[in-house]
Structures are given as C-alpha cells and as structure tokens.
Amino acid sequence: MPLVLLIDDDPRFIKVVTSLLTRRNFQVRSVSNVEQARHALRRMDIDLALLDLNLPDMDGLSLIHQLREEGNNTPVILLTARSEPHEQVLGLRLGGDDYITKPFDPELLLARIHAVLRRSSAGAGRTTDRERSDLVELPPVRIDLSARQVFKHGVTVQLAPMEYAVLEFLALNRGRAVSKEEIMLQVWGTDRGISRTLTEHISRLRRKLGEGLVVTKMGYGYIIPAASEVPETKAQ
C-alpha cells in the first residue's frame, strides 16, 4: 500500500485529500510545515509527497530545491492555487514531478498520483550508464542533475534556485547558442520583462563558477561551449 506524505497547512484540505486517498487504498501521513516535512522524509519510507507551495515557514519551491540538492528523489506533486505558467515551469525545473492547480478534480489528482508512481517505479531500475548521464562535466565545474548540485574543483557551490535553473538549461544545451528569449521562456515561463533579471543571474553564475563558463553570443544570447570550442568573448 503506497505511503503518501501530504504537506499542507489547511486542515479542511488535509481532511478531504486524506479521505479520498484512504478510500483508494493509500496510506496517508500529513504535516503542516517544512520542518515536519523534512523529518518525515528522512525517517519514513515515503512513496510520494503532495506539496503545497504556500507553507507558513518556507515556500514550497525552496523545499523541493533543498530536497533535490540533498539527493532526496522522493516523487513530488506540487499543489497550489498559483496558476502562473512561470511558477509551474520553475516548480518542475527545480525537481517537481508534476503540478496541479487548486481547485482540482479528485479523479485528476488520483490519475496524476498513479502516473508519477508508475514513472518512479520504472526509473528505479536505472543502469549505471544512466546514472553517469546525470553528471555534466564542464571542467572545473561538475553538475549533478539528479541531485541538483554543482561543484567547482570538487567543492560544492551554493546556487540560488533560479541560478541553478539557468545553468542547467544552458548545460543541457551545451554547444548551442541559446537566445535570451528562449532561456527566459524555459526558465521563467515568459519571454517578456525579465531580460535584466537574466543578465544578473548570468553575472552571478560567472562570479561563482568562473568567467569563461557562460559565453555571450553578441546580439543573441548565451552559450556554454562544447569541449572542443574556444570561447569567443566574455559577456557583460
């Protein structure tokens, strides 16, 4: 019987979802804040977590980012009243397995839960080759995509969630020049009004990881060069 951890601070919502899932042969444990959630995820064998983004002691996006940085790969479905596309995109890029906007149909929630559990079960048998593919080598920088951790010369580098999201997108497109609009659309969910924000994130990545990692394609966007390429210019 799958064990679901429900992380939400609304007692009425917890009661409704718990009743729904127990009738469908799920075990349910509920917590109302991040500290309780961390404790449960460390001490209990959780099959799937339902995570509300509006928690009293921390935003749910920060929690999912921390979990993935710690190497906790428990499947997580994000539940929230936020309907903005960039919130959904960011939640998934930071490690969420699915995203459902409140209010939702109970059958939709059940279908999403079963789908995520199926994917999780299929992924449990990953091969060593697959595990190696989760590492991106950009000497002296290494990115562990599964744990969402970044290292420079073997030392962990702390990145803010959006800094990591930008770096991951560029790294997965290594060797291809990516326009600013494409980065903003993929990371923020919009290509309008945040070009300066993107520039600031790129600047912080360079300060933390080295000026030569992300290269500017003048008048276009950015690129992390392929191993055989020589950077053309440093971005401003």
Image (tube, helix red, strand yellow):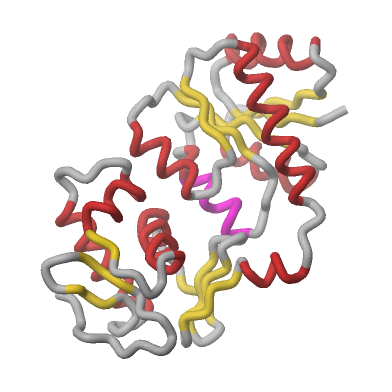
Q: Residue 96 at what x, y percent from top left?
A: 55, 42
For the N terminus, the image quarter is top right
x, y (%) of residue 98? 56, 35
Residue beneath the point at 14% across and 75% down: 236
Q: Along the line of sight, which residue is nearer the eye, 50 or 170?
A: 170
Asked whether, in this view, residue 113 is left or right of residue 87, the answer is right
Image spot of residue 233 (x, y percent) = 19, 84
Image point 59% across, 40% down: which residue?
97
Could you tell me residue 75's position as x and y percent?
67, 41
Residue 143: say if magenta.
no
- Side (left or right) of 98 relative to 4: left
The quadrant where residue 175 appears: bottom left
Residue that extends furthest to the right in the rendered view of this protein:
1
Give the camera-side residue of 154 and 87.
87
Position of 73 relative to 189 (above/below): below
Camera-side residue of 15 and 114: 114
User: Which residue is pictured at 76% across the width and 24% down the height?
Assistant: 28
- At horizontal 34% and vertical 38% (from top left) the residue drawn is 86
The quarter holding residue 45 reads: top right
Q: What main secondary structure does the magenta stretch of the protein show?
A: helix
- The total number of labels drawn is 0
Q: Is the residue 108 above or below the residue 97 in the image?
A: above
Q: Is residue 67 magenta?
A: yes
The magenta stretch spans which residues?
Answer: 62-70
